[in-house]
Image (cartoon, helix red, strand yellow):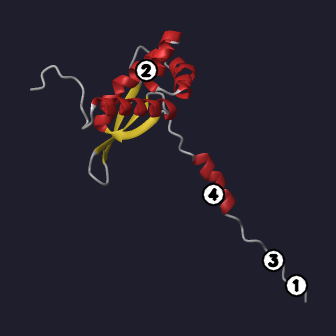
Amino acid sequence: MRHQRSGKKLGRDSAHRKALYANLTASLIEHGRIRTTESKAKAVRPVAEKMITLGRDGSIHARRRALAYLRTQEIVHKLFSEVGPRFAGRPGGYTRIVKLGPRQGDAAPMAYLELVDFVPDTGRAEDEGSRSRRRREPEQVEAPAS
């Protein structure tokens, strides 16, 4: 029985699982939203929230703890300079899970794990501009004078 056993194994050994959590958390911090399975999203969510809490703290000790887990200086810099200050006034709950439905290949339940202030870039302004460039009026060719 699994009494008092927290966390999912996800079919991986502990080192692989830790690397998976670190990589997914880094991707979430970098992009603001990641598309993954529901099980992975639910497993990564507490790790990501702890990293954002470290980013809110801003101390050298917090930065070193985040660097030990995330392993990339660029991601840690973004966490402490952009993501952490955005959530400075929020007492937790920095991420949300949006369920998407089954994956095409194996019907695994998919979800977005995203930061609560994430605004998806629809790119509509770019589409309208490119559409207007593509649709040109046919040029009028003057008939030769006879």
Within-10-Å neighbours for mark 3: few <14, some 14–19, many 20+: few
Within-10-Å neighbours for mark 4: few <14, some 14–19, many 20+: few
Residue at the image position 39 percent from the left and 19 percent from the top: 50
Decide which of 1, 116 is in the foreground and name it.
1
Where residue 10 sits: x, y (%)?
26, 36
Gap between marks 3 and 1 measured at Cα:
9 Å
Where residue 99 sits: x, y (%)?
32, 39
Where residue 59 sits: x, y (%)?
52, 10
Q: Is residue 124 above or below residue 53?
A: below
Q: Earlier in the sequence, mark 3 or mark 2?
A: 2
Gap between marks 1 and 4 measured at Cα:
33 Å
Residue at the image position 49 percent from the left and 15 percent from the top: 64
| 129 with respect to 20 (left or right) | right
Find residue 17 and report its image quarter. Answer: top left
Gap between marks 3 and 4 measured at Cα:
24 Å
Gap between marks 3 and 2 measured at Cα:
65 Å
Q: Is residue 123 above or below residue 67?
A: below
Q: Secondary structure at mark 1?
A: loop
User: What residue did someone put label 2 on?
Assistant: 51
Decide which of 115, 23 is in the foreground and name it.
23
Q: Is residue 14 above or below residue 126?
A: above
Where residue 66 sits: x, y (%)?
46, 19
Residue depth check, mark 3 versus mark 4: number of the one nearer the observer: 4
Instruction: Assess whether mark 2 and mark 3 are in contact (beta carbons under 8 angstroms).
Output: no
User: What residue did someone put label 3 on?
Assistant: 141
User: What residue did someone put label 1 on?
Assistant: 144
Gap between marks 4 and 2 measured at Cα:
42 Å
